[in-house]
Amino acid sequence: MAGLAKARPAGGVAPERPPTARQLFGALPRRRPSGPPGTLLALRTPLPGRIRTLLVLASVAVPLLVWLVLGASGAVEPRFLPAPGAVWTAGVEMARSGELVTDAWATVRRILYGYGLGVAVAVPLGVAMGSFTAARSALEPVSGLLRYLPAAAFTPLLLIWLGIGESPKIALIFIGTVFFNMLMVADAVRQVPLELVNVSYTLGARRGEVLGKVILPYALPGIVDAVRVNFAAAWGLVVVAELVNSQEGLGKRILLAQRFTQTDKIFAILVVIGLIGVTADVALRITRDRIGRWVP
Amino acid sequence: MTGLLELVGVGREFPRRGRAVPALTDIDLRIARTSFVCVVGASGSGKSTLLSLVAGLDRPSSGEILLDGNPVLGPGPDRGLVLQSGAVYPWRTVERNVAFGLELLRIDRAERARRVAWYLEETGLTALRSALPKQLSGGQRQRVAIARALACEPDVLLLDEPFGALDVQTKEDMQLFIRRVWRDTGTTVLMVTHDVEEAVFLGQRVVVLASDPGRIAADITLELPEERELAIKRTPEFLELRARVEDLVRTFHQHAG
Ligand SMILES: Nc1ncnc2c1ncn2[C@@H]1O[C@H](COP(=O)(O)OP(=O)(O)O)[C@@H](O)[C@H]1O
Ligand SMILES: [Mg+2]
């Protein structure tokens, strides 16, 4: 600044200034503005409620309609694709004979045991991994590796180790979900801001109190979310387990139906599996939203 | 008179690329009971490091820190800490945030409610007692953090740029607020900020921190009236003090530009 002022000649002639950026560079090309976004394709914008409901309904109705039309037209053999009516009848028949309830309960029970056990193990270990570097170093590499071993490939081993009762099925669900849950719970715990932990110490909290009164409540919605996401994997595994060896269960019922080419029965069972799964998912989602009411 | 809080030859080094780089060196500071001391310095001059050391969240590499003559060995409710982000518990209501320290002390319910009510009233949060932090404005959240720390009856309240994220109007409200709370509670305040005007307005004493490594460049006792209103910021005495401190901060700021 001072240098410039001094350089100005007494006569008042404008001093030599270096060219401005505008003078130095040519003008940039201008792009046509992108215009106001349409409602339907605007990125991450809420849609009007009516359009949303419409889209949700269509996503269910359109495949159903295609199925109805294909079934009615006879374009596809019922052996491959039974008509919706036939599936409904098969489902009602199974329900009436009581086998549907027995099978569904057998399957659900296996999930409750196997997945419940997995969650009971994964949550404490995951919290430890997320809270203590020592636990993380000890557990993360192993669980990260084991997670990539396909659980279904363990079925023969489990049969050799545990025999043919309920235990190999429960163990399969456990193995197939516990590592995912551990890592995801640990991630949820690591979201806790360090500042929150430090401030808690200055308010007089001991380590255990920080864990129980700060880290756990903060991570709880994330933990429930992890449990909800991995629940879907448990469903996939239980059906695989039942295909191999069992007396009852929805997977077993599918295998039996296949033996007699009862495609309508298979479809009915698939629908039941889907419905139970969605119900569980919605229940967990509601739980999460209630627990996480405080989340900004 | 010996201070309530004493820092004697305090230094803190951090390892950086295999070398120990000092963030703070030779900090000698004596803070009297019930005083209001502001530390100003450019960003990176070690202000947060200083408060972490006093809070006991970090240990000095050299020297020692004494509170009432006893060495500081770890964090505790006798040194309440308020950060720029507030760090309130988002799942707890305002009331239960303020009650946190008292819950840990197992104070009986009636006594706890009595104390919480006093601090809510003092900080103007009574009407918001059942609100969740996500429903609060930035200034209200800082009030919660301050009330939560004060409810533990700290010997010294440590404030780390507590109003740094607020807009100017809210910031001035909060400055008046913290002066009032300081007088009403009789606590001692050690506040760090990079805002010179704020430091001169709030403090009875302003300590200027030089950067690289952080060290004390000046320690100025302010001759301003004890009753301070915002209008004081326009008086010649204030402006002169402010200019003096600003010059000091600029002189000792190494990486200007
Ligand atoms: N945990 C840490 N590890 C390494 N260096 C740190 C750490 N904390 C602070 N520092 C360094 O110490 C110096 C002072 O930082 P800080 O106290 O945060 O400054 P201020 O709060 O005044 O902005 C900075 O150079 C910073 O990089
Ligand atoms: Mg800082």
Image: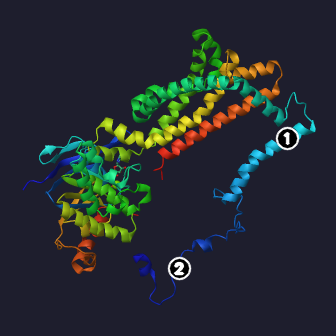
Q: Is residue B212 visible?
A: no
Q: How crowded is mark 1: few (under 14 residues within 10 Å), some or many (20 or more)?
A: some
In the displayed structure image, the side of residue B257 where residue B183 appears, left or right: left
Give the quadrant of residue A258: top right
Residue at image coords 52%, 46%: A289
Write down the residue under mark 2: A16
Which quarter of the rendered picture does the N terminus of chain A lie within?
A: bottom left
In the displayed structure image, the side of residue A182 where residue A242 appears, left or right: right
**Colour mode of the rendering:** rainbow
Write down the residue under mark 1: A68
- Total numbered labels placed on residues in the image: 2
Where is residue A179 drawn, in percent x and y? Answer: 54, 27
Q: Which chain carries label 1?
A: A
- Considering only vertical position in the picture, is A108 above or below A286? above
Residue at image coords 58%, 24%: A109
Q: What residue type is labelled 2?
A: Glu
A51 or A18, which is in the foreground?
A51
Q: Is residue B28 visible?
A: yes
Where is residue A8 drawn, in percent x and y? Answer: 46, 83
Q: Which chain carries label 2?
A: A
| Label annotation for residue B37 | none
The answer to the question of whether label 1 and label 2 lie on touching residues, with beta carbons closer than 8 A, is: no
Q: Does the residue labelled 1 lie within 8 Å of ligand 1?
A: no
Residue extending furthest toward the front? A96
Marked residue nearer the N-terminal end (1 or 2): 2
Q: Which amino acid does label 1 sit on?
A: Leu
- Considering only vertical position in the picture, is A8 above or below A283? below
The residues tagged by marks 1 and 2 sit, at their Cα atoms, a distance apart of 83 Å
In the displayed structure image, the side of residue A235 where residue B180 appears, left or right: left
Where is residue B204 drawn, in percent x and y? Answer: 18, 66
Residue at image coords 52%, 42%: A287
Where is residue B181 drawn, in percent x and y? Answer: 23, 63
